[in-house]
C-alpha cells in the first residue's frame, strides 16, 4: 500500500472521528465550564428564592445610595460588601462535569423548581442569569464540597466544586447590614449610661474620669472604645415593637463628642418572654433591632460601673 492511499485512509478516518464528536455532543469545544456568565458591573437586581428562607422571595436592588434587601413588607439597607461577594462569586461557578442530562434525575440532585434555591440576575430589565442551586455533597477524604446547578430551561445538572454554591444559596439575613455602631473613636469625649446604673465616663484633657472625679485607666477606656468602634449584631429582632406592652426600656448609652455630627444613642429593652431577652438598637442604624442574651452584644455595650 503506497503512501497516497495511507494518507487518504487517514484523512477519511479523521473526518469520521470529527463528525462523531460533533454529532455526539462530546467534542471538547462543546463543553464550557463557565455555565454562568455575568458582567458584574451591569447587575442592578437579584431575585432569590433561597432554601435558607424556605424559598420565600428576597430582592436585592441597586439604588443610588447602595443596595437594598427586601423580604415581604420589610426593606432594609443591604451590606454592599455581601452583595458584592455574591456577584463576584458567580464567576467562581465553573462546572467540572455534567452530572445528569434528564429531568427524571432532578430529584436526586434537588434541583427541581420546588426544592432548589432559584436565582435570577438582572441588568436593568434584561435577565443576565437564571439558575437553580440544589443539594451539596461533601467528600470528607478529599475535603471537597460539590454543589449541583441547573440552568433555567435546561434539563442538564452540573456539578460545581468549591464554595460557590453555598455562598449563592444564603438567605435574606446574609445580605443585610448588621452594623450597630460605626464610630470615630478619636472623636468620642463622653459616655453617659442611664438605667439601673447612672454614670458618666468623660475625657478631661488627657485623662478619663468616672462621674467627673474618679481617674480611670486610660488604656482600659481606649480598649473599650475600640470595641465600640465598629460593632455588629448577629440576630435580628424583626417585628420588634419598642412601644409594645411586653417590652421594657432598661438601659441607654449616649455617646458624645464635639467633633461628632450628633450624639449616638444606644438603647436596650428587655422582654423575659423572648428566648434572647434583650433587644438592642442604635440611632445610627434606627431600623435594625438585634436580639441578644446577657453575654454577647448587650454585655459588650452596657458595661457595669464596677468594671471600669
Image: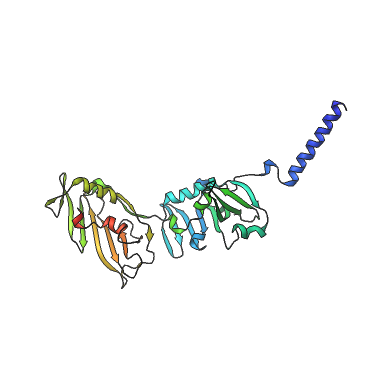
Residue 180: % across, % down = 33, 55
Residue 284: % across, % down = 31, 55
Residue 53: % across, % down = 48, 62
- Residue most toward the right? 1
Q: Is residue 4 visible?
A: yes
- Residue most toward the top? 2
Q: Is residue 259 left or right of residue 151?
A: left
Q: Is residue 17 left or right of residue 73?
A: right
- Total marks shown come to 0
In front of the other: 97 or 179? 97
- Residue most toward the left? 213
Q: How is the image coloured?
A: rainbow
- Residue most toward the front? 141
In front of the other: 294 or 20? 294
Residue 270: % across, % down = 29, 66
Q: Is residue 156 left or right of residue 93?
A: right
Q: Is residue 282 visible?
A: no
In front of the other: 281 or 302? 302
Q: Is residue 307 left or right of residue 87?
A: left
- Which quadrant would residue 136 be assigned to in this image? bottom right
The quadrant of the image that shows the N terminus is top right
Q: Residue at x 20, y 57 (%)?
A: 192
Q: Residue at x 66, y 44 (%)?
A: 31
Q: Is residue 86 above or below residue 266?
A: above
Q: Is residue 202 above or below residue 291?
A: above
Q: Residue at x 24, y 61 (%)?
A: 252
Amino acid at each position: 500500500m503506497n503512501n497516497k492511499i495511507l494518507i487518504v485512509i487517514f484523512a477519511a478516518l479523521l473526518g469520521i472521528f470529527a463528525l462523531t464528536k460533533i454529532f455526539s455532543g462530546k467534542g471538547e469545544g462543546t463543553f464550557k465550564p463557565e455555565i454562568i456568565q455575568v458582567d458584574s458591573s451591569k447587575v442592578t437586581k437579584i431575585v432569590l428564592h433561597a432554601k435558607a428562607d424556605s424559598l420565600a422571595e428576597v430582592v436585592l436592588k441597586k439604588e443610588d445610595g447602595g443596595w437594598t434587601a427586601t423580604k415581604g413588607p420589610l426593606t432594609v439597607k443591604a451590606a454592599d460588601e455581601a452583595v458584592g461577594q455574591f456577584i463576584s462569586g458567580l464567576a467562581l461557578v465553573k462546572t467540572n462535569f455534567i452530572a445528569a442530562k434528564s429531568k427524571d434525575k432532578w430529584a436526586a440532585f434537588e434541583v427541581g423548581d420546588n426544592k432548589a434555591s432559584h436565582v435570577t440576575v438582572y441588568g436593568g430589565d434584561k435577565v443576565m442569569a437564571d439558575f437553580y442551586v440544589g443539594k451539596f455533597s461533601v467528600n470528607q477524604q478529599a475535603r471537597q464540597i460539590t454543589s449541583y446547578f441547573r440552568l433555567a430551561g435546561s434539563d442538564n445538572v452540573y456539578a460545581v466544586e468549591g464554595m460557590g454554591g453555598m455562598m449563592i444559596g444564603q438567605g435574606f439575613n446574609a445580605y443585610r447590614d448588621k452594623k450597630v455602631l460605626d464610630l470615630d473613636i478619636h472623636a468620642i469625649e463622653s459616655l453617659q449610661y442611664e438605667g439601673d446604673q447612672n454614670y458618666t465616663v468623660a475625657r478631661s484633657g488627657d485623662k478619663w474620669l468616672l462621674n467627673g472625679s474618679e481617674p480611670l485607666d486610660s488604656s482600659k477606656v481606649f480598649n473599650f472604645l475600640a470595641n465600640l468602634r465598629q460593632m455588629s449584631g448577629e440576630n435580628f429582632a424583626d417585628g420588634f415593637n419598642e412601644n409594645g406592652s411586653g417590652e421594657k426600656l432598661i438601659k441607654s448609652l449616649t455617646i458624645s463628642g464635639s467633633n461628632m455630627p450628633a450624639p449616638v444613642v444606644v438603647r436596650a429593652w428587655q422582654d423575659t418572654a423572648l428566648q434572647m431577652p434583650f433587644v438592642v438598637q442604635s440611632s445610627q442604624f434606627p431600623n435594625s433591632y438585634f436580639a441578644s442574651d446577657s453575654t454577647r452584644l448587650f454585655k459588650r455595650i452596657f458595661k457595669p460601673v464596677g468594671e471600669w
